[in-house]
């Protein structure tokens, strides 16, 4: 299997760093793992490293387009430990970054035994992966209850959130003017490109149930979902624009007065941009993220998707919170300010610097 036409450097010959990112994407699991690997790759490449994505990322199409635009090579990423070690050796990789909830822990153990530096991107639990560096992507950097290998480093908290360059480019200027309270708020509602739990129609119905004037941009996962959203009755001064999943979501979020979304990793992007965010949990695994950002006062909490769905058009607690946000610009502005202060967008640079230092120490 030939991954690079150049011959490996001779012993003692200086060469650039070579780093593999092991992550997968699909319509079922979404593109979050690959997206944050893409964010880290931007910082690593600025440091002169040659970076490869090892995994399956042919779909969703919008994600593959972003990988192509960035020029990040996508190569096979085996799940078998021996095969993954063979790939890493043939590619002369100095380090492998693992970002997966399903990859067998034997993979990290085999790679470390082969002398390859391992970084693991984790979300509240290391899932028995062995690594030299752990980056805990759970907001707030809560303890993940893991026994780390001797000498392993752990980075956590908002300072180490992996934020893409496109998100940094969309950051709002400080002290953004507060809109006139009589002006309908512009709301962006999205639950990922695939929205497997049907969150957008539920959230849109709750927003409309507030009765407050608004301009709503809803990101529909497909034609059927778009038809459901467009059929929802609107009140006076309520307008809905339904769009397909877009690559320029950070720019779209930048123009919104309020963003309603799931309590996933994209919340960190939105906080970095300086958005006022209202979050919903769509799975039990999102509860730690939800509780962390809510407890830190960075978002408005709307509860679970099932709770919001069960309420229908009734004015329950979630609808009441949305109405207050829609009608109180100063509260939205305060949320946005706190979020932007917490997530400064330099996490990738910090993580990349430490990973490069670990590789240098191993080489030395």
Image (cartoon, grey):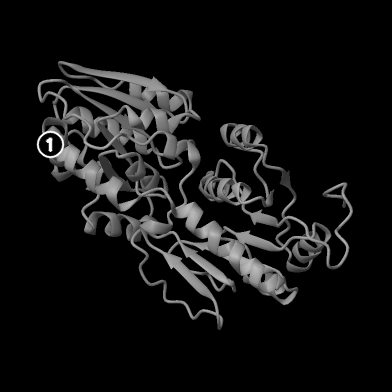
* Residue at image location 75% in from the left, 73% down from the top: 114
Q: Is residue 122 left or right of residue 80?
A: left
**Quarter location, residue 80:** bottom right
Whether residue 315 appears in this view of the structure is no
Identified at 83% across, 59% down, the residue is 90
Residue in the image at 10% along x and 25% along y: 181
x and y percent of residue 20 in the render? 68, 55
Q: What residue appears at the point 35 percent right and 27 percent down from the top-left corner?
A: 218
User: Is residue 356 shown to the viewer in this render?
Assistant: yes
- Nearer the observer, 16 or 147: 16
Q: Is residue 253 above or below residue 338?
A: above
Is residue 106 found left or right of 128 in the rendered image? right
Indicate whether 309 appears above or below 22. above
Closer-to-camera residue (13/39): 13
Q: Quadrant of residue 277?
A: top left
Give the total of numbered labels. Answer: 1
Say which residue label 1 marks: 330
Return the x and y of residue 58 as percentages of the image width and height: 66, 39
Return the x and y of residue 35 as percentages of the image width and height. 54, 45
Q: In which quadrant of the rendered image does the C terminus lie?
A: bottom right
Looking at this view, is 281 or 232 the one in front?
281
Count residues near mark 1 (Cα–Cα under 10 Å), then give few for <14, some for 14-19, many for 20+.
some
Q: Residue furthest bottom?
A: 150
In the displayed structure, does residue 231 sit left or right of residue 351?
Answer: left
Give the vertical position of 250 relative to 302 (above or below).
Answer: above
Provide the secondary structure element on which disc 1 rests. Answer: helix
């Amino acid at each position: 299997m030939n991954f690079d036409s150049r011959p490996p450097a001779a012993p003692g010959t200086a060469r650039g760093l070579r780093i593999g990112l092991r992550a997968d994407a699909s319509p079922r699991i979404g593109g979050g793992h690959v997206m944050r690997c893409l964010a880290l790759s931007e910082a690593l490449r600025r440091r002169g490293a040659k970076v490869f994505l090892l995994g399956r990322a042919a779909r969703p199409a919008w994600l593959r387009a972003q990988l192509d635009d960035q020029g990040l090579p996508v190569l096979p990423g085996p799940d078998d430990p021996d095969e993954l070690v063979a790939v890493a050796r043939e590619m002369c990789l100095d380090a492998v970054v693992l970002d997966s909830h399903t990859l067998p822990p034997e993979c990290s153990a085999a790679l470390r035994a082969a002398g390859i530096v391992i970084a693991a991107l984790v979300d509240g639990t290391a899932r028995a992966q062995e690594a030299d560096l752990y980056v805990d992507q759970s907001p707030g950097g809560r303890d993940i209850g893991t026994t780390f290998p001797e000498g392993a480093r752990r980075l956590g908290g908002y300072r180490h959130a992996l934020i893409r360059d496109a998100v940094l480019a969309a950051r709002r200027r400080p002290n953004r003017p507060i809109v006139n309270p009589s002006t309908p708020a512009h709301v962006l509602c999205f639950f990922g490109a695939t929205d497997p739990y049907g969150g957008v129609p539920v959230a849109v119905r709750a927003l409309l149930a507030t009765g407050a004037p608004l301009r709503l941009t809803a990101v529909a996962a497909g034609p059927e979902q778009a038809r459901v959203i467009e059929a929802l009755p609107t009140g006076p001064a309520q307008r809905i624009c339904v769009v397909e999943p877009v690559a320029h979501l950070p720019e779209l979020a930048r123009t919104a007065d309020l963003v309603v979304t799931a309590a996933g990793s994209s919340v960190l992007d939105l906080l970095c941009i300086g958005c006022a965010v209202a979050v919903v949990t769509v799975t039990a695994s999102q509860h730690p993220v939800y509780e962390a950002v809510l407890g830190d006062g960075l978002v408005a909490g709307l509860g679970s998707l099932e709770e919001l769905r069960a309420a229908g058009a009734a004015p329950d607690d979630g609808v009441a919170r949305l109405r207050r946000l829609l009608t109180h610009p100063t509260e939205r502005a305060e949320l946005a300010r706190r979020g932007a202060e917490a997530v400064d967008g330099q996490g990738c640079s910090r993580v990349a610097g430490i990973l490069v230092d670990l590789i240098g120490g191993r080489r030395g």
